[in-house]
Amino acid sequence: MLVRDVFTGPGALARLAGAAMLVTTVAAQHPHPAFGRAIARDVFSQVPNWKFFAPNPAVHDFHYVYRTLDAEGRTSQWHEIEMIEPRRWHQAFWFATRRPEKAVFDLCTAILQHVARWGISSVQENSSYRVLAEFIRRTIRESQPEPTLVRGFQFGVVRASGHDASEAPETLFVSPYTLMEPDNRPHLSAA
């Protein structure tokens, strides 16, 4: 009696449409191409396309380090920028504070791709490099007791395997020294 009421009682059409949408959404997440038919026929993009796991998940972390150059020409030790915060249980559902970490990761990936393709000589003209350098510059200003004494800085990107201590960290990129107070040249020049 109860099962028949689900399909025939008041609101049955809405329950059937909701159930069909749920089954279609779950099926669309399967990686096999046969399950992709629903998305292929979805003209109005009503079926969500969520992928719960990346097809090639990251197995390494990027660590960002910097050192400063003072007015007397002395170079400091390398300092690590703590980007990865400890995870909490509620972040499995909502993790908006990870956005800056992800943005810096994406900038770093773009810089490494630029260096691999065109070499290091033109990297300072790359927009991703400029944004990352400004992020490092801001971090130095916030962390130094007297940032006015810092003349320049250099930053590096180190790849580490996270919790696997058997793999040594690898330095992927070290920037040239960058002025703490950048010159005010316009980024675009007239032709």
Image (cartoon, rainbow, N blue to C red):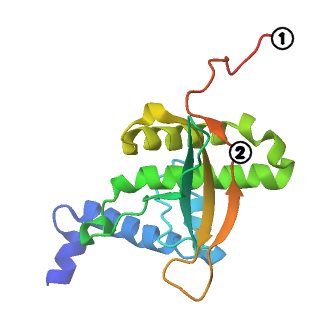
Looking at the image, tell me whether mark 2 or mark 1 is earlier in sequence order.
Answer: 2
Label placed on residue 176 = 2
The image shows residue 190, relative to residue 95, as above or below, that is above
> Where in the figure is residue 86, as x and y percent of width and height?
33, 69
Quarter of the image for the N terminus: give it. Answer: bottom left
Position in image of residue 78 (x %, y %): 54, 58
Q: Observer-nearest residue: 150 or 114? A: 150
**Does residue 42 appear anywhere in the picture?**
no
Q: Which residue is nearer to you in this view: 59 or 132?
A: 132
Q: Is 57 placed left or right of 163 in the picture?
A: right
Q: Residue furthest bottom?
A: 166
* Front residue (pair 171, 69): 69
Q: Quadrant of residue 38?
A: bottom right
Question: Which residue is at a point 59% across and 58% down the rendered structure image?
Answer: 41
The image position of residue 109, as x and y in percent, is 65, 55
Nearer to me, 17 or 161: 161
| Residue 124 shows in this picture | yes
Query: What is the x, y in percent for residue 66?
Result: 55, 52
Please name the amino acid that badge 2 sits on: Pro
Which numbered circle lies on residue 156? none
- Residue 191 marker: 1
Q: How far, Cα to Cα, is label 2 from label 1?
A: 28 Å
Mark 2 secondary-structure assignment? loop
Question: Residue at coordinates 83% horizontally, 11% vertically from top-left?
Answer: 191
Asked which quadrant contains residue 22, the reply is bottom left
**How many tags in the picture?**
2
